[in-house]
Image (cartoon, rainbow, N blue to C red):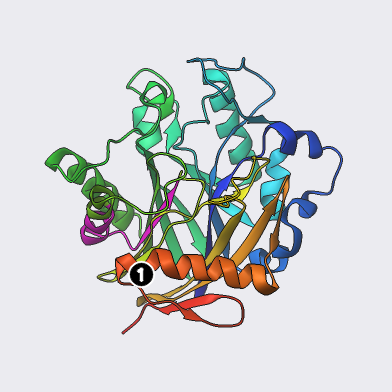
Amino acid sequence: MSILALVGDIMLGRLVDEEIPLRPPESFWGSTLPVLRSTDAVIGNLECAISARGLAHGRIEKVFAFRARPAATGVLRAGCVRCVSLANNHVLDFGDDALIDTLHHLDAAGIAHAGAGIDLAAAARPATIQAREMKIGFVALTDNEPDFAATDTRPGTFYTPIGTDFSTTSILRQSVNRLRSQGANINVLSAHWGPNMVEFPPPSFRSFARSAIDLGFDIFHGHSAHVFQGVERHGRGVILYDTGDFLDDYAVDSYLRNDWSFIFLLEVDGQGLRHLRTIPVRLQPARVDLAGGEEAQAICQRMIERCAPLGTRLSPANHALELPLCG
């Protein structure tokens, strides 16, 4: 049995970056650290470049540009982050050189990555990690920021419009076949998709995620909305429509509460997915902690409400929510 933790956006730039030289790397993970370190791997979306080079708004003019210093890899390693998606709308905020540095720094730290690269072939290339006896395959894509898309001759992201047309499903099928040829036991599709602050996935997104599971992915790992969305069991797989934020310095919307999220713990074995446990967390600037008391109950209740339209019933258990995935 292996335990994977899937989390949402990890943004280590701006105010978080300023804290990196001043604090131990473990401190950024707060009281979630024992949970993260009890897993075999943490998987998240790295929502920034890691580099000391580049100019802000290197490829296009943007409102926000995120970059973290190279020591940020120590923060990731301290939290047991072993694999990240780079397919998002911020990894090229400081241009091509900063993206290339990000790849090198992650490689040097032993952190697997997918979703961006020196060209389209590299951006589309799956990653694999070993989690005890299980080999986990990982593909990352985004429908955000088409100007960041990789081409045959330009670095960038694995940009893929969301749809169930033949062209898109062929891309997903090729990725699954490639992972199977590499001996992956569990396949994850990570998607940075859709607009911000959306509480429920639209029908087209549900169709896309279900199609990915039907094609052979076991876990759909969504992010981008900055708020968590519901969970759906489909066939032999599970869809996490949006895993929300996890570590950042963002302003908090008092209604949507983008400072509320979860650690999504998945137990997997040679038979596939066995169990999902979602543990509520509370974000502060440059720190994330386990939620407790009435706040944990409120976060869990919001998840239950967001799961209801998807036909998913999560069971409360010790300030968390659970969903059996076998049988």
Q: Say which element carries label 1.
A: helix
| Quarter-of-image position of residue 53 | top right
> Is residue 145 rendered to the left or right of residue 5?
left
Residue 175 in sight here: yes
> Is residue 109 rendered to the left or right of residue 172?
right
Q: Is residue 136 above or below residue 104?
A: below
Question: x, y percentage for residue 246?
Answer: 60, 52
Query: Which sits in the foreground, 102 or 66?
Result: 66
Question: x, y percentage for residue 26?
Answer: 77, 54
Residue 38 in sight here: no
> Is residue 160 rendered to the left or right of residue 166?
right
| Quarter-of-image position of residue 249 | top right
Residue drawn at (42%, 38%), measured in percent from left and top? 115
Magenta stretch? 209-223
Quarter of the rendering occupied by the C terminus: bottom left
Query: Which sits in the foreground, 169 or 277?
Result: 277
